[in-house]
């Protein structure tokens, strides 16, 4: 009988191939990780910006409600409500913005409304996001 030497082909990767893959993965990780590290702080800043936008909408909407309810424009904000002179009905400005709380002030002479986000989630106190906004309401 004739003996045939059967040589089995070994499957798998060589050490060089494995090292090359690890080097490529290391390079990808070094490039990708710094891009994703700041995602949490960016998301927190955007959440504060969204809260400020909601507060701005609340202030302008309640201002419009005051104008519809009363004959004259409001003279100020007291206790987070648009107030006017004698005989006017105050209109509250919502302060609850979901996870955040806002406070409002108004400079009658200039028409400048200042919004400040005063409270929020646990990370809010340490956030570097801008927590105030000012804008002008034009009296026509």
Image (cartoon, rainbow, N blue to C red):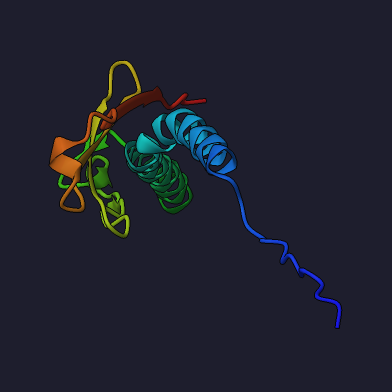
Q: Position of residue 2 (x, y in %)?
A: 86, 77
- In the image: residue 100, left or right of residue 63: left
Tell me the residue at 15%/47% (across/down). Answer: 79
Tell me the residue at 44%/41% (across/down). Answer: 60
Q: Position of residue 101 (x, y in %)?
A: 22, 50
Along the line of sight, the residue nearer the viewer: 121 or 100 = 121
Q: Furthest residue to the front?
A: 1
Tell me the residue at 25%/43% (across/down). Answer: 83
The quadrant holding residue 128 is: top left
Is residue 89 something that shows in the picture?
Answer: no
Along the line of sight, the residue nearer the viewer: 47 or 88 = 47
Along the line of sight, the residue nearer the viewer: 52 or 83 = 52
Quarter of the picture holding the N terminus: bottom right
Is residue 137 something that shows in the picture?
Answer: yes
Q: Furthest residue to the right?
A: 2
Along the line of sight, the residue nearer the viewer: 55 or 85 = 55
The quadrant holding residue 116 is: top left
Q: Position of residue 118 (x, y in %)?
A: 17, 42
């Amino acid at each position: 009988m004739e003996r045939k030497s059967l040589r089995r082909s070994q499957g798998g990767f060589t050490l060089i191939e494995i090292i090359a893959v690890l080097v490529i993965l290391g390079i990808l990780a070094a490039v990708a990780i710094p891009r994703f590290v700041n995602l949490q702080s960016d998301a927190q800043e955007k959440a504060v910006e969204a809260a400020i936008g909601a507060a701005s909408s609340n202030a302008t909407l309640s201002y419009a409600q005051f104008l519809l309810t009363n004959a004259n424009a409001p003279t100020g904000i007291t206790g987070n409500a648009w107030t006017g002179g004698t005989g006017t009905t105050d209109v509250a400005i919502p302060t609850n913005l979901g996870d955040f709380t806002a406070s409002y002030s108004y400079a009658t002479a200039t028409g400048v409304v200042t919004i400040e986000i005063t409270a929020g989630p646990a990370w809010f106190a340490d956030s570097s996001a801008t927590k105030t906004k000012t804008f002008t309401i034009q009296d026509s």
